[in-house]
Every structure is written in structure tokens, then in C-alpha cells.
Amino acid sequence: MLNLNNVNTMTPEEIKETIEGMLAAQRELQNSQLKLQESQLKLQEESQRQREDINVLRQDISTLVQGIGQLIDVSNRHERRIEQLIGYSLTGESDRLDLYQEVNDLKRRVERLENLDN
């Protein structure tokens, strides 16, 4: 620390060295401030890039959610169709069984009638 009482007794060389030391300290302080400002600017730029990346990801997620919703709709339609086809298949099978039973009944009647004629 500079003692002002000693300024009068300082030689010009000592005053020059003191001033140079003060100027060097001031330069270091300014350089530190510049580095701090550069760091803050880099952090702001990185933060801005991250916000932009987040916005892109949000849009991608929104698109994926819409796509998933569409896939669910298609899947539900397919499931209903499969259920309909199974229903038709079961109904058709039932109809075939009924027809088979009726044909068998007719065969038995024909055989009975033929046996009565003989």
C-alpha cells in the first residue's frame, strides 16, 4: 500500500516504480475483467444454443407424440377390423355347422324314406 507521507521522500525512480506497479495491477485487473466478460459472453451464447436445442427437441417430441397418436388410431382401427373378422369367422363357422347338421338330418330322412320304401 502506498503511504502518502512517504511520497515527498521518494525518489523519482521509486515514484516511477510505484506508478508502474499500479499500472501493471490496473492492466491485470482490466485483463481479468475482459476475460470475465468473454466467459460471460460464451456462457450466454452456450445458453442460447441450449435453449434453441431444447426448442428443437420440443418440436421433435411434439411430432413424435402426434405420430404415436396416429399409430394408436391405426392400431385401434386394425384391432376393430380383426375383431370383426373374428366375429364373421365365428358366425360363418356357426353357419357351416348349422348347414352340416341340416345336411346330416336330410341324409337320415332320405335313408329312412328309402328304408320305408324297401
Image (cartoon, grey):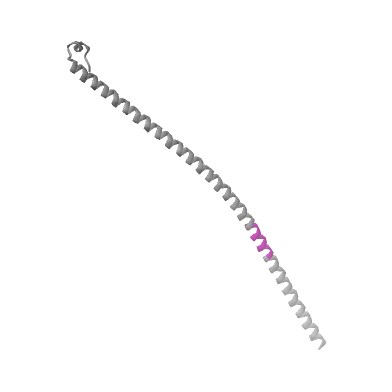
Residue 69 screen position, x and y as percent: 59, 49
Camera-side residue of 58 and 11: 11
Instruction: Please state the extent of the stretch shown in magenta in the rendering.
Output: 79-88
For residue 100, what is the image quadrant? bottom right
Horizontally, residue 38 falls left or right of residue 16, namely right
Vertically, is 100 above or below 48?
below
Where residue 78 appears, x then y in whole percent? 63, 58
Residue 56 pos. (x, y %)? 51, 42
Residue located at (21% from left, 16% from top)? 15
Front residue of 37 and 73: 37
Query: As rendered, which of 90 and 25 lies closer to the eye?
Result: 25
Residue drawn at the location 78% of the way across and 80% of the way down: 109
Please name the residue shown 76% across and 80% down the image. Answer: 107
Does residue 41 belong to the magenta stretch? no
Instruction: Determine if the magenta segment contains residue 83.
Output: yes
- Pick the quarter of the image with the C terminus: bottom right
Quadrant of the drawing holding the N terminus:
top left
